[in-house]
Amino acid sequence: MRGTCSPSFTVHARCAPEQALPTPFSTVLSETSPVSFLLWSQVWLGLATEAFERGHSFVRAAARRDPGAPPPPAAGAMSHVLSELWSFRSDVRAALEDFIAGDEDPDRSSPRSLASTLRFNTLKLSASERAPRICLAVLEAVGVNAYRNDSEYAVGRLLRDALSARLMVSNERIHAVDGRLLTILKSV
């Protein structure tokens, strides 16, 4: 989502018919969405992980300043964040394993099946909601040091980038597609 300040432009091009993809865009989209959603989820997991690491560094620095004192208040909040982060990691890993298994096992649903579409749409939705939630939780745990842009614990840019995850392919549009799929599928 960076580069949103770039000026718009129009591209005019000519090509030979054989250079154009004969496959309809809807087919290309349905076949590439699982991979896109897996890759994006990894990026958003990376943003959340970086935010957590900054919050963790803050907690460790606070503890080093006063050895022997009870853990700083942010430590308990960061424990909650860690739980969410590990759950996020597990979900992304499981989706990758499902994708690989579906690709290798002819008896399992193909990446193009309706159930598989629902699976990877759900991953995109979950990841795009978790990443900003984790960044925001770190911001709240660390406080002003995470809010300031000149701080080594700053998470503002990470939060901004994580929030864009809901916009790149609108979550509401995906929920609408998933709603239609749920009316068709007998089991998920």
Image (cartoon, rainbow, N blue to C red):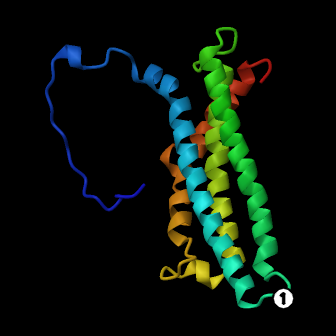
For this view, does 43 lie left or right of residue 144? left
**Quadrant where the image shows the N terminus:** bottom left
Q: Is residue 170 visible?
A: no
130 is higher (above) or lower (below) than 17: below
Q: Position of residue 107 (x, y in %)?
A: 69, 9
Q: Position of residue 162 (x, y in %)?
A: 55, 58
96 is higher (above) or lower (below) than 146: above
139 is higher (above) or lower (below) than 52: below
The image quarter containing residue 55 is bottom right
Q: Residue furthest top?
A: 107
Decide which of 104, 181 is in the foreground and name it.
104
Residue at (63% x, 33% y) in the render: 96
For this view, does 164 lie left or right of residue 184? left
Decide which of 26, 116 is in the foreground and name it.
116
Decide which of 59, 168 is in the foreground and name it.
59
Q: Residue furthest bottom?
A: 66
Total number of numbered labels?
1
Q: Is residue 80 visible?
A: yes
Q: Position of residue 122 (x, y in %)?
A: 67, 37
**Quadrant where the image shows the C terminus:** top right
The image quarter containing residue 3 is bottom left
Q: Secondary structure at mark 1?
A: loop
The image quarter containing residue 141 is bottom right
| Amino acid residing under circle 1 | Ala
Residue at (63% x, 66% y) in the render: 53
Q: Position of residue 63 (x, y in %)?
A: 74, 83
Q: Residues within 10 Å of mark 1 (few under 14, many from 20)?
A: few
Decide which of 187, 62 is in the foreground and name it.
62
Instruction: Please give the residue where the numbered disc 1 appears in the rendered image.
Output: 69
Residue at (74% x, 23% y) in the render: 183
Residue at (74% x, 52% y) in the render: 86
